[in-house]
């Protein structure tokens, strides 16, 4: 089995600065999505990403141990807080989603603190997508790690009566999308584990995946494409040489144009992918 990683990041069409950040190596991908309404969140996204990487280096990953799952976010946010203080930045600069993924024992483990998506390519034209969202009325209000060390901020967030949902989409290239939605406590982080041998690819993405715009609005005025509608275009990996994800995004743009759509996301978009192969000829597939 061969596992390759690649990342993609692009500023949103309605942003002047990209507040997403993503880093990777052969065995991990870490993504952070800064809040556009928080000053210097592009800096906070970097602090959180590099502190998460440092945690994985300093501490042996033990995702099966409850104490490890509690220690990881606490360690990261306190070290990121120290950096922001030394630079004279407000604590709110750390208002950023953080998604940490890494490979241990041929399994990808994912820890999500905030909103975003996990996309599994289960077959040639079959995908499963987990989409995490936080809403207070019509507002998006992710629960950032910052709230765990900010008493007043946490109280204000609690009073906003935020609803957290995890939607599971089963996506076929030809056919309707099947969706299951469940609610969970806003301060309960989402954790996933996926054996590499069961999938062709495993990806994480910021909520920019839910910000693609239609060429023409629906009859009800909706202009936004569902993230699940973008999955077959973006994650249809056929081969892996070089920067396979970045190449796939170029292919996606051409496919969308041919379908009468457009590659226009108003929010920043970052994606990281583990591509799983079982041979040397560049084709993807399950281990046999």
Image: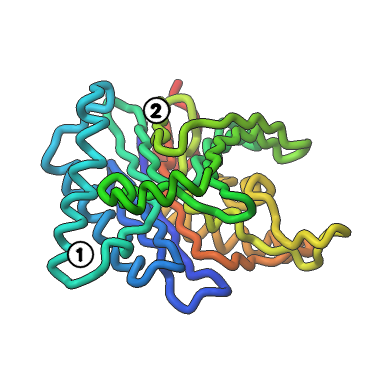
The front one of 171 and 140 is: 140
Q: Is residue 110 visible?
A: yes
Q: At which x and y percent is residue 22? A: 35, 57
Q: At which x and y percent is residue 216? A: 81, 67
Q: At which x and y percent is residue 177? A: 72, 36
Sequence-wise, which precedes: disc 2 or disc 1? Answer: 1
User: Quarter of the image holding residue 90?
Assistant: bottom left
Q: At which x and y percent is residue 95? A: 36, 58
2 vs 1, front mark: 1
Residue drawn at x 70%, y 36% is 172
The residue pinned by badge 2 equals 193
Residue drawn at x 37%, y 55% is 32
CA separation, marks 2 and 1? 32 Å
Look at the numbered discs 2 and 1 and tell me whether their residues touch, using CB distance below 8 Å.
Answer: no
Say how the picture is coloured: rainbow
Location of the N terminus by quadrant is top left
The front one of 173 and 138 is: 138
The front one of 126 and 81 is: 81
Q: Is residue 196 visible?
A: no
Location of the C terminus by quadrant is top left
The residue pinned by badge 1 equals 84
Disc 2 crowd rating (10 Å Cα; few below 14, some 14-19, many 20+) is some
Q: Which of the numbered marks, if any, corresponds to residue 269?
A: none
Up the image or down, 69 lies above or below 244; here it is above
């Amino acid at each position: 089995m061969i596992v390759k990683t690649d990342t993609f990041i692009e500023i949103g069409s309605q942003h002047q600065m990209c507040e997403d950040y993503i880093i990777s190596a052969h065995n991990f991908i870490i993504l952070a999505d800064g809040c556009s309404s928080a000053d210097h969140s592009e800096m906070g996204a970097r602090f959180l990403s590099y502190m998460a990487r440092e945690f994985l280096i300093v501490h042996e990953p033990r995702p099966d141990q409850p104490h490890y799952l509690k220690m990881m976010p606490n360690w990261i946010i306190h070290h990121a807080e120290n950096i922001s203080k030394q630079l004279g930045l407000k604590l709110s600069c750390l208002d950023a989603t953080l998604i940490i993924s890494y490979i241990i024992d041929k399994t990808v483990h994912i820890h999500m603190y905030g909103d975003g998506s996990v996309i599994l390519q289960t077959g040639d034209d079959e995908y499963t997508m987990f989409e995490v969202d936080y809403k207070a009325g019509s507002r998006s209000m992710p629960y950032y790690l910052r709230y765990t060390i900010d008493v007043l901020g946490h109280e204000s967030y609690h009073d906003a009566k935020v609803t957290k949902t995890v939607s599971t989409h089963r996506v076929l290239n030809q056919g309707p999308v099947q969706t299951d939605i469940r609610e969970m406590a806003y301060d309960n982080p989402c954790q996933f584990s996926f054996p590499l041998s069961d999938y062709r690819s495993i990806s994480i993405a910021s909520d920019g995946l839910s910000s693609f715009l239609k060429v023409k609005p629906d009859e009800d005025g909706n202009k936004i494409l569902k993230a699940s509608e973008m999955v077959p275009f973006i994650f249809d990996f056929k081969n892996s040489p070089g920067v396979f994800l970045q190449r796939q995004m170029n292919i996606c743009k051409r496919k969308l144009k041919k379908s009468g759509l457009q590659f226009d996301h108003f929010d920043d978009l970052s994606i990281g992918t583990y591509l799983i192969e079982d041979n040397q000829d560049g084709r993807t597939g399950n281990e046999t």
